[in-house]
Amino acid sequence: MKHQLGFLSGSPQISTRPDAGTIGARAHILGVIRAFERLNWEVKPFIVGDRVPRQLVNVGSEQGVRRRFLFALAADLMLPVLGAVNARRAWRELGRRVDWVYERYSPFNSMGQVFKRHGIPWILELNEPVLRREPAPYKGKANKTNIVLSGLARRLEIRTFKKCDVLVCISGTLKEIIVREAGIPPAKVMVVPNAVDSEVFNPETCEPKRIFAGFTVGYVGGLYPRQGLELMIEALSELRAEGAEISLVVVGEGTMRAPWEALARRLGGFEHVAFVGRVQWREVPRFIAGFDLGYYGQLRPREMEMYHSPLKLYEYMAMAKPVLASEFEDARRVIRNEETGFLFQPNDKEDLKRVLKQAYGSRNELPKMGSKAREEIVSKHDWLARVRDIISAVEDQVVKSR
């Protein structure tokens, strides 16, 4: 008999629909669900973003609802109420039909709490806590991370962390932050980095979509300041002036697209930089297959630890592409420097130029490095391995203790 899992997600902006704007969250959710299913679990989803009108989960919906202060304040006041309503609906729909619930955390939501009150283990997955979002006063414009009632959001967040049975964090650094700042017992917090579905991201099953004929560095993801693409654009311009024939393809949308396009024009050589925009999720592997090198240039946050676990690292490597990455926790753990990729110091353009020049000089070796990268991902970083770890931890920490 199959085990039954309730998968919960309370954010109206996160959806698994094919046209969802949150591509990374969509891939994460589907990766976890599919891995549970491959391990003979039946998954019953209650994903709010799949149940609301499409305009709320399409590109720009979050920015639109938070464009003005009063709208943002109304959203913050409304979300706890909607969270409580959705929790009741989830219980009525799934109730005692599930053995466990797995909830993707979002501010003002704790749908799994009602299940725990009825004796059902509640696993909470944490990707970005409110208490560590970069502080930014509300300015009446689009702000991806802005929450007006941040104090209330933090209090509710910490209470949710304390009530769940197992808290899944995406990095060791994030675990340290939660233990230190929210007072959560370390034994309750499990580190589960991001991963990839290596059957979906498989170079053997997709036709490459190549923009440039020559050596191409590629980026896939949101275009926001912390991604550090200005470093790559500047480094590329300077290396091209030295004779290196390198092109850049950028796949994704975000607030920095226009400034980065303007920077590329200003530096010259704009014909060697392609901003593709947002693409359908099924097209992402094809674009990565058309790169020679994947780029992840996360900048060091001001006065904050870098705790993210970027999906793009795993997606590039699953597509047999070496990665050029700034040297943070996840990159150091996943990439073997000069074997499956190249690491450079965060925020350091000169070091980026050094390793980019090194990669360009060894470009004939990159396919071999990419093959090693895929082997690493398939054996250690597929969602199947991650979910096995989660199941084992919950059985040891929660099920056996009851």
Image (cartoon, helix red, strand yellow):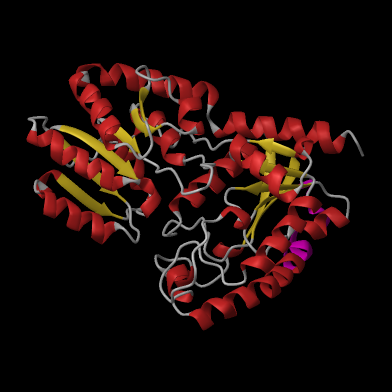
Residue situated in front as seen by the camera: 337 or 80: 337
**In the rendered image, the vertical position of residue 91 relative to residue 294, given as above or below:** below
Q: Position of residue 285 (x, y in %)?
A: 35, 39
Left or right, residue 330 beside residue 398? left
Residue found at x 43% / y 24%: 335
Residue situated in front as seen by the camera: 149 or 273: 149
Q: Position of residue 373 (x, y in %)?
A: 40, 22
Quadrant where the image shows the N terminus: top right
Q: Quadrant of residue 185?
A: top right
Quadrant where the image shows the C terminus: top right
Q: Quadrant of residue 45?
A: bottom right
**In the rendered image, the vertical position of residue 304 relative to residue 346, given as above or below:** below
Q: Is residue 160 magenta?
A: no
Q: Quadrant of residue 38?
A: top right
Q: Which residues are magenta?
A: 89-100
Q: Position of residue 283 (x, y in %)?
A: 33, 46
Q: Residue furthest right?
A: 402
Residue found at x 66% / y 65%: 153
Q: Residue furthest front?
A: 303
**In the rendered image, the vertical position of residue 199 relative to residue 149, given as above or below:** above
Is residue 301 visible to the viewer in this orientation of the structure? yes
Left or right, residue 363 beside residue 220? left
Magenta span main SS: helix
Q: Position of residue 384 (x, y in %)?
A: 59, 31
Left or right, residue 149 beside residue 222? right
Is residue 213 visible to the viewer in this orientation of the structure? no
Residue found at x 55% / y 63%: 49
Residue found at x 56% / y 68%: 147
